[in-house]
Image: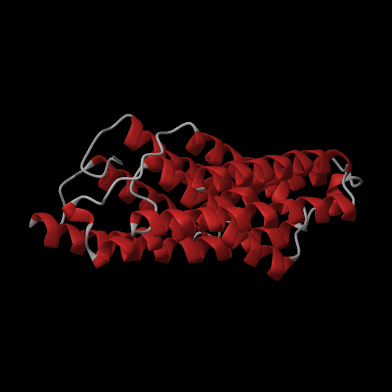
Amino acid sequence: MEIILFEFALTFYFAAAIVGILELFKGTKTTSRIMLGLTVLGFALHTADIITMYAIGGHIPISNLHEASSFFAWCIIFLFFFLEYRYRIGLLGSFIMPVVFIMMLSSSILPRTIKPLSPVLQSYWFGIHTLLAFTGDAAFALAFGIGIMYLVQEHYVKSKHLGGLFQRLPSLETLDEINYRLITIGWPLLTLAIITGVIWAETAWGKYWRWDPKEVWSMITWFIYAAVLHVRLIAGWRGRRAAILSIIGFCAVLFTFFGVNLILKGMHAFV
């Protein structure tokens, strides 16, 4: 059952991504509504899939890379709905849904075996630590999308091409402010995720820090976003610089999530 739900969710996300890309070239209110409707349907099926997997496994379905990739995509969509409700940026889905689809497609080709949690993961810290990390990373994913939108809009402003897509994108000031707000949400969540992870590590292994590849790259990501906030507040870096840093930061997030697990094996590797 969970396989069927996942495949249907993937299909709706794919359709939403295609409509979103088409909307960049010739969008209307109708295409925006279609894209949002497809996303809602995909999210509903995706949620049902996660609930089903939780019922089967007895834990949050993030114990392997297939489950984690799927749950990461779910968190991105969840925050996307809040951002869409708050700011009504119809085109945001055009930049976010391709990312979500790629993550779900990656998840679909990974092993899907549902296994019991290892003894070290059977802790209440498992849910707390991972939910904080996934939610923070989802905020960074949206900041990435907003950063791309900023660079696109800036290109139109500098080229004085003030028609078409320019008129449907938010102003540079609005995009810069949303980017900042998302990072101020994601960075504290990542901070708490690292803190709870350190406490959990001491409980499980007797050491707060073991220089595991994922621990190291999580700290690298933390420093990148700390730098983004620092240079904005202290040096006044806004706009283009902030957008580029948010894009670089999300690349670090992706490497921490995928690269570390696939290339740099460690204690945090998914089974």
Location of residue 258 in the rendering, given as x and y in whole percent from the top left corner: 40, 37
- As drawn, 78 above or below 26: below
**Direction from residue 233 to residue 167 in the image, left or right:** right
Tell me the residue at 57%/37% (across/down). Answer: 102
Name the residue at 37% across, 52% down. Answer: 223
* The quarter of the displayed image where residue 121 is located: bottom left
Quadrant for residue 57, please give it. bottom left
The percent position of residue 69, horizontal first and vertical second, equals 46, 44
Q: Nearer the viewer, residue 38 or 196?
A: 38
The residue sitting at the left extreme is 206
What percent of the width, then of the height, locates residue 30? 89, 53
Give the number of callouts: 0
Q: Position of residue 189 (x, y in %)?
A: 41, 64
Q: Is residue 94 above or below residue 173?
A: above
**Could you say which quadrant of the image residue 134 lies in?**
bottom left
**Front residue of this view, candidates 138 and 111:** 111
Q: Is residue 196 placed above or below 5 in the rendered structure? A: below
Front one among 81 and 193? 81
User: Residue shown at 65%/59% (left/top)?
Assistant: 176
Q: Please, which colouring scheme is shown?
A: secondary structure
Quadrant for the C terminus, please: top left
Residue with the most extreme front position: 1
Q: Which residue is at a point 60% across and 54% down the rendered structure image?
A: 45
Q: Nearer the viewer, residue 114 or 255?
A: 114
- Residue 234 at least partly seen: no
Q: Is residue 178 left or right of residue 48?
A: right
Visible in this render: residue 100? Answer: yes
Question: Looking at the image, which residue sits at the far bottom?
Answer: 86
